[in-house]
Amino acid sequence: MYPELFRIGTFPITTYGIWLALGMLCALFAASRLAARDGLPGERIYDLGLWVLVGGLVGSKLLMVLVEPGVQVFTFDFLRSGGVYYGGLIGGFLAAVILIRFYKLPFWKVSDALAAGLALGQAFGRQGCFAAGCCWGKATSLPWGVHFTEAGHEYTGVPIIGPDNTDLYLQPTQLYESFAMLAVFAFLVYLHRHKKFDGQVLIAYGILYSIIRFSIEFVRDDPRGDLWGLTTMTGLSTSQLVSIVVAIVAIVLMIVRLRSAKGAEALPKSD
């Protein structure tokens, strides 16, 4: 793994940053193409997407501060860290709600396009996590276990030596999520063509990502804090607790809106 590609003077160009930038560009491109299918202006989606990214970055940092007491905010490490993803999801969602209303765009149509793009962006972003060595998994003897480099250890603190002073191999949790979200993206693009109602893509994303993230958390092992003591109380990580809430809300929305769509289809059409 190569967390740092090169330096411009003393400023490092990180592999994580490159993957993240590629993910953002691909996500915006995919979202604009899907939005065009629904008759939405592509340029507005680019504007909206950029502000949603800003909201996501702010949200991820805020949740990081909440779940990791004592984190040093005014440091370069804090600025270059990815933060907590669910905080970014909430921050980005709130930014989208505000700006969609400001631009007078149809919320559910825009959300469907952004949700599919987000899944693609995550697939790229987790490749960046893998390159940097962050978000690592538990020790494993599986044949695909990953031994990170000394550079990765220095950069993110990923453990590389086991208790018996031998090389430590870890679950590649970053790749699990990356490949899973690539599959989710493909499914959401398909669903976008065949959706029964506007908003179905966004809701499906909420359900699928919650399941994937909840499952992967069982084999993650990087320290991620304890929000209000809930992790200690329940034995579940903060992300698992948020996943449960998101999944429940998304499933309820899916049922309600599917029933509404079927009801609308059953109404007699006037001449």
Image (cartoon, rainbow, N blue to C red):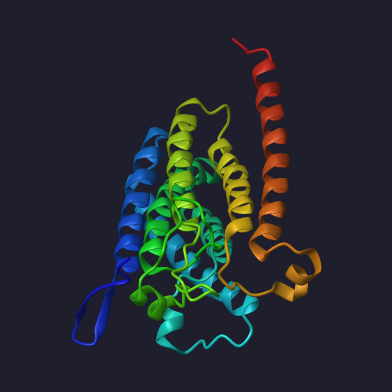
| In the rendered image, the vertical position of residue 92 relative to residue 38, given as above or below | below
Q: Please state the horizontal and vertical placement of residue 139, each as a whole percent of the image.
A: 54, 63
Total marks placed? 0
Q: Please state the horizontal and vertical placement of residue 114, each as a whole percent of the image.
A: 46, 48
Q: Please state the horizontal and vertical placement of residue 187, each as a whole percent of the image.
A: 47, 34
| In the rendered image, the vertical position of residue 167 relative to residue 104, given as above or below | below
- The residue sitting at 39% across, 33% down in the picture is 37
Q: Nearer the viewer, residue 54 or 239?
A: 239
Q: Residue furthest left?
A: 9
- The residue sitting at 67% across, 34% down in the picture is 257
The quadrant holding residue 31 is: top left
Q: Residue furthest right?
A: 233
| In the rendered image, the vertical position of residue 224 relative to residue 23, given as above or below | below
The quadrant holding residue 199 is: top right
Image position of 218 (left or right of 151): right
- The residue sitting at 57% across, 75% down in the picture is 64
| In the rendered image, the vertical position of residue 62 relative to residue 51, given as above or below | below
Q: Residue furthest top?
A: 271
Q: Please state the horizontal and vertical placement of residue 69, each as a whole percent of the image.
A: 64, 84
Q: Quadrant of the N terminus?
A: bottom left
Q: Quadrant of the C terminus?
A: top right
Work out whether residue 209 can be spotted: yes
Image position of 188 (left or right of 27): right
Q: Nearer the viewer, residue 64 or 97?
A: 64
Work out whether residue 44 can be spotted: no
Q: Nearer the viewer, residue 250 or 146?
A: 146
- The residue sitting at 44% across, 53% down in the picture is 175
